[in-house]
Amino acid sequence: MNDWFELHDAHRALRATGGSSLSDIRRVLRRLIESGHAESSLFNRFTYSKNPHTGLREWRIAAPRGKDRKDWSEPLKKLAPNLAEASLTVLALTDSANERLGQLTVMLEGRSVTRKPFSRSVTRKPFIVAAHLDDRHMGSGACGHALFHCHVGPSFKAMPEVRVPLPALKPAAALEWALSVVLPDWEPVPWHEVIAHANRQGT
Amino acid sequence: MPDPVASIANAIQRDGGDGIVVVYYPDLGVRDWLVSEVESIAAVETSVRTDSVKDARTHMDSLVLLLPANERAAVEELDGARDQFLEPKRAYPVVLFLLRDGDGARALREAPSLASWVRGSDPDPELLAEVDVEAERRAFEAGAGASPEEWLARWRAKEIPMDASNVVLSYRASLLERR
Amino acid sequence: MLPDWSRLAPNRPLDPGDVAYVPRPMDAPRIPDWILTGRSPLLVVGPVGVGKSTELAFAAQALKDSRIACLVPLDRFENMRTLTAEQALLRVAGRLAYVAVRALHLPITPALLDELDMYGVLAGGVAPKVTGMFPVRSERDVGDLAILVIREIARKSTQGRVTLLIDGLEKTPPEPARLVFDALEGLHSEVEIVVVVPWHAAYGPGAETVIVPGEKLVVVPPVEVEGQAGTAGVEFFRNVAARRLRLDEATIAQAPDTFGAPGGVLDTCARLSGGIPRSFLQLLADAVSYARILDGKDWPEPVHVAQAVADQRESFRRLLTPGDDDALRSVDGKDGRNMALEQKLRLLAHGVLLERHEKGQPVMRPHPIVKSLL
């Protein structure tokens, strides 16, 4: 039971201060652009709106002007083999001081492609990779519906409905994880760096 | 559609990157956050925070975040010494933070030279970010068929199917929700 | 090949001889014309960003064959808000000596250079290598020091006369400005002087103490960009953009139709600039920046100009004080005589209000972007 309490505490800590590290998302977006996975204007389209009465801020990726595109969904390029398309959504709600992270969603929707051997026919199947920090307790508890969890599958509702608890990753790290699922060369912490880090720590 | 982030990015980049930029803030807490936001948007290697115009001039290769306690004095000094920032050419701009409707903002009305330089690169990001709540609520109701509160109640009760577009809608409803 | 948009540099005046200079479309005599016909001193006035510094640089270039034409950008060295008469004279002397030694290779008396160096007004490398050989007369009157430099240079140069083009004084408040003008008065018999003056010095209370009989006031007006009369003005701005960006035919061919076509990006920026070159360059640079930031595009489109205009509108809005709206509405199209002087000077200085000439008469017009706020 201790693990679930600890996880819940870590999620609450993430909620309390996670807003202040939201701008680190731009560091990841920049790397996405530099490695050719997204168009250059993405960096400055991660933006926010504010409710002047409540002070609440909504963060999102705005669409480029004049593009016929869903306002929240940024198409990515140079995907992993057998992925035909993937679009990135980043959403967050923060308080007036941008300290408290009320909600966070990092989501990738797309389609995979499967070719039948010795045949020209291809099958396209939808997929979704999403990390959610919910704004309140959902489901029956911290194991089945942890505050910060992820979905990976053909849709949110595909059975069995799996919500994998996530550690209390900050927003930028959650984004890095989601991207690592669909981008073949995306590894923010290669093993050799992990080993070097461990050696520095003497562990 | 005004955009706070695009306005900051534009102000930083417009004059070939070596201009003077003014960013307005509503209170000190938000100023500190805006300072880090400007650093994040500028995405430069080095940035320097200072309260002195003279010191600002010496940091040629850094983004300078100028945070004077006496904003009027800083505006007047920048107005009088504006052209000294031209040579040698700076790598990044000097960003002066001024309290919205404060003494520095009033001083800028009496400082035509500086005001002329920063025209169009003096955003008030917090003001630009503000949504017209009533108009947005009407638009939400027209699109979703329910008020933000009604829609959120159904969403939280899992009566609305979870898909990408509804996840997005839930954020907009939360932004517009009356508290 | 795409344009190097950073060349727009709205805040950088051109240097003398810069090939990006485009002559303004005007019938009136220019600064060099007045000087060549013996009119000195010339006092130059105009709204911020209208191109006063660039006109001075052009004049320096145009006059250089017939005299030592020395551009003195005081604002590059001093805080113009706190400038003293002594600092102004020392900067004039220091700049002149620098130009004489560096550009004209004139042998200036080392003692004189020593003295200027002592005041810290000689740019690097000009001071004599061996110091201390001549007594430094620190007690010398700085006006005398300036005159010594002027006379020595006039005597040793082939041109035989000196013209000072002094920039930056438009930023100086009334009282220190008056003292500086008094000090410069002492040089009138030695040199031809062209000096940029503030609005208050030209039109404010006590203007007669600055502009005395015999002095010529040259107004650098906004370029006419409205209506049929503005056709030449719009063409001027198109040329300004082309020269600054060094656009060649191949580059222009890459531009979208909406960039250079009549009524396109360039024309819209020109017309909404109110005829102020800095406004034009800011609008265009803003639009370019938005095109890149928001849409990843290399060329600005009308939608980006609209965003640039919205930014400038907010800047202007912040400059207005209570009562300005009504005053601007009522002065629109009139000569401005009935407007409160202090308010008029403030709005003219900011370029919120522009003085134009329509059918030969001076007419006040709010800046076109300001007009959309009224």
Image: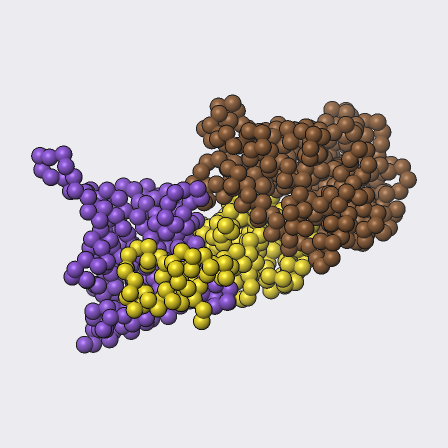
Chain colours: A purple, B yellow, C brown
Residue at the right extreme of this rendering: C213
When the figure is inspected, residue A145 is found, relative to residue C10, above or below; the finding is below
Q: Quadrant of the N terminus of chain A?
A: bottom left
Residue C298: percent from the left, percent from the top? Answer: 46, 36
Residue at the image position 69 percent from the left and 39 percent from the top: C50
When the figure is inspected, residue C41 is found, relative to residue B147, above or below; the finding is above
Q: Nearer the viewer, residue C315 or A125?
A: A125
When the figure is inspected, residue B91 is found, relative to residue B33, above or below; the finding is above
Q: Is residue C78 visible?
A: no
Residue at the left extreme of this rendering: A118
Residue A82: percent from the left, percent from the top? Answer: 19, 42
> Total marks drawn?
0
Q: Is residue A100 visible?
A: yes
Task: Locate residue C155: give its quadrant.
Answer: top right
Residue A91: percent from the left, percent from the top? Answer: 36, 58
Task: Locate residue B169: give its quadrant.
Answer: bottom left
Q: Nearer the viewer, residue A125 or A22?
A: A125
Q: Quadrant of the C terminus of chain A?
A: bottom left
* B5 sits left or right of C157 in the view: left
Q: Nearer the viewer, residue C47 or C190?
A: C47
Residue at the image position 22 percent from the left and 51 percent from the top: A127
Q: Nearer the viewer, residue C115 or C368?
A: C368
Residue A46: percent from the left, percent from the top? Answer: 41, 52
Residue at the image position 36 percent from the left and 48 percent from the top: A70
Residue at the image position 81 percent from the left and 46 percent from the top: C336
* C249 sits left or right of C152 in the view: left
Task: Locate residue C333: give its quadrant.
Answer: top right
* C76 sits left or right of C211 in the view: left
